[in-house]
Image (spheres, rainbow, N blue to C red):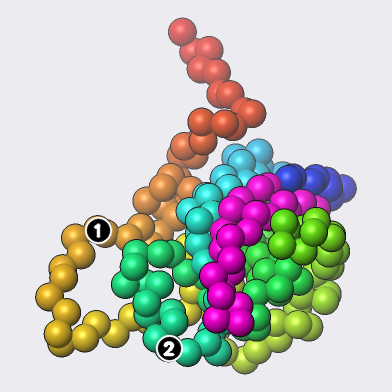
Amino acid sequence: MTARISKDFTFQSAIHIDNNFCLNSYKVTLWMDVMTDSIDEQNIAMDRIKYFIDEGLDNCVFVHTGSEKSVIENYIKAGIKICTLPEEPFDQVVGAVIMCKINAITEGKLFVTEIKIRSRICDDVEFYICSDETVEFLATNEPHWYTQSNMANNDWLRKSSKKEKIVELKREILDWAELGLGWNNKHKLSEDSDVVYLNLDK
């Protein structure tokens, strides 16, 4: 029997729309089917979701990939995290991309069937999106960051100019295993996890 769970998330991001930078806050509810009997895999999948929202979406700027190249490059040069979208950053688009990405990173352990999203800019109007609508909306033959199981949150490859002499020494984490969130890793629980493992051997 497949279990069904839901989880609420909040994060703050900005959107770039009509050449304007607008701060926004989001509230998201996910409805998910649990597709694995392993408690450890369920916890890993949930921690992947939390990590992606905290590190990939919180404090980012949602920007349409069709925006002028200089717009995206200026955000990157300013050290602002970007999240590229296939359309303008309306709530429905953000919700569809989040659903698609989460289903990619949980790799069949959890499956998001519905998402509810609302934001301050949209006067807290709630949008409901189901998985069938998401697949249809984001249908593409090309791979995008939201269809891949890694931690990427954009498709933008920065091409450094020859004039730039800045060297960045920060190494990006590219693999879930480095965070202890690989399926074969011993799971490292997050600080706010509700599960506690007890060793009663001694």
**Vertical placement of residue 141 versus 74, above or below:** below
In the rendered image, is residue 105 in sight?
no
Viewer-proximal residue, 202 or 170?
Answer: 170
* 12 part of magenta stretch: yes
The image position of residue 138, as x and y in percent, is: 70, 82
Q: Decide whether residue 153 is among the magenta residues.
A: no
Residue nearest the viewer, comparing 171 with 5: 171
Residue 68: x and y in percent read: 47, 89
Say which amino acid is labelled 1. Answer: Lys
Q: Specify the label residue 170 is tagged with.
A: 1
Q: Main secondary structure of the magenta part?
A: strand
Binning the other alpha carbons within 10 Å of mark 2 as few (below 14), some (14 to 19) or many (20 upward) gives: few
Locate residue 166: give its quadrant: bottom left
**Closer to the N terminus: mark 2 or mark 1?**
2
Residue type at the position of mark 2: Lys
Residue 71 vs residue 109: left or right? left
Identity of the residue drawn at 47% across and 79% down = 155
Question: Dot 2: what SS?
Answer: helix
Say which mark, if any, is on residue 69.
Answer: 2
User: What range is drawn magenta here?
Assistant: 9-33
Front residue of 162/50: it is 162
